[in-house]
Amino acid sequence: MSWKIKDGLISEEDISKKYNLRLFVTTRNFGNMRELKQRNLFVKTINLDIKSLVYGEQVHSNEVFVVKDERKDNYIKGIDGLVTNRRFVPLAIFTADCLPLFIIDTINRVVCLLHCGWRGISLNIIEEGFLMMKKCYGSKMENCCVGIGPYIKPCYFTVRKEVMDKFNKKDGEKETLSSWRLDLGKVVKRKLIGLGVKNKNISMCNMCTCHQQEYFFSYRRDKEKSRMMSLIMLK
């Protein structure tokens, strides 16, 4: 499994093709995806109906919403994760250093997309995502394939000791007496395996949102509000 850049999108082609999905993260080439105008322009270029796009407020919570029916308003307040088994319903999140997590139940054809910053991860948003998949669709972790999208790598992600105390010290490197470099990818992968996901079914993107300015917006680097969009959709 591998992540590749094509036509300005970063995608996990092996997972997408094998499980008949659209799965990608936009680059800064397409502009700020939090802006409605830019989002509309982009969605038209990939032949999706903007009215079908479901996305959340993103408040660094552990709240996950299940999309079961047609919706008049596809903006969901107070959530950081989405789950559905409906075909042709694109789920989206917006990031600029946080980790986008794509989860696919390969047996029951269910997808989940989670916005994973350190706050959400420490509040167990990953566990909540799996719980909703299991509760609503009978998903089993051993049947899931997972994509870990681009995020800020530890060489650029320094956190306070009180933040690091929420995580396993093996997932970080001490920088000073009061600061650590935290690897969100390591934290997430450790959680996934602990929940029963097979290591061979986890695909991690090695790109860094802070370092690779030519591709990504980064809040840590630029302190701006521009965001990339991560999208997953069952075809």
Image (cartoon, helix red, strand yellow):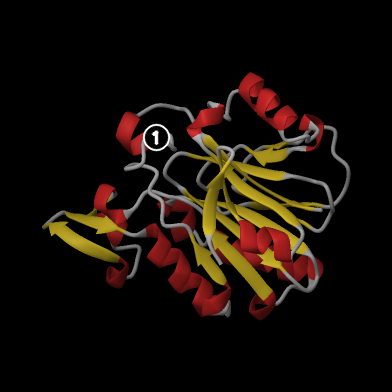
Q: Residue furthest left?
A: 177
Horizontal relation, residue 225 to residue 67: left or right: left
User: How far across and down, in percent of the image, does residue 138 sit?
Assistant: 78, 73
Tell me the quarter of the picture where residue 200 sits. Answer: bottom right
User: How far across and down, in percent of the image, does residue 179 sit?
Assistant: 19, 53
Q: Residue furthest top?
A: 37
In this picture, is 181 found above or below 133? above
* Residue 83 showing in the rendered view: no
Residue on which disc 1 sits: 214
Q: Residue at point 56% right, 67% down? A: 1
Q: Residue at point 17% right, 62% down? A: 174
User: How far across and down, in percent of the image, does residue 124 sit?
Assistant: 51, 62
* Residue 168 showing in the rendered view: yes
Tell me the quarter of the picture where residue 44 sits. Answer: top right
Tell which of 85 and 216 is nearer to you: 216
> The residue under label 1 is which amino acid type?
Glu
Horizontal relation, residue 136 to residue 36: left or right: right
Tell me the quarter of the picture where residue 104 sits. Answer: bottom right
Q: Residue at point 35% right, 65% down? A: 167
User: How far across and down, in percent of the image, does residue 177 sit?
Assistant: 11, 57
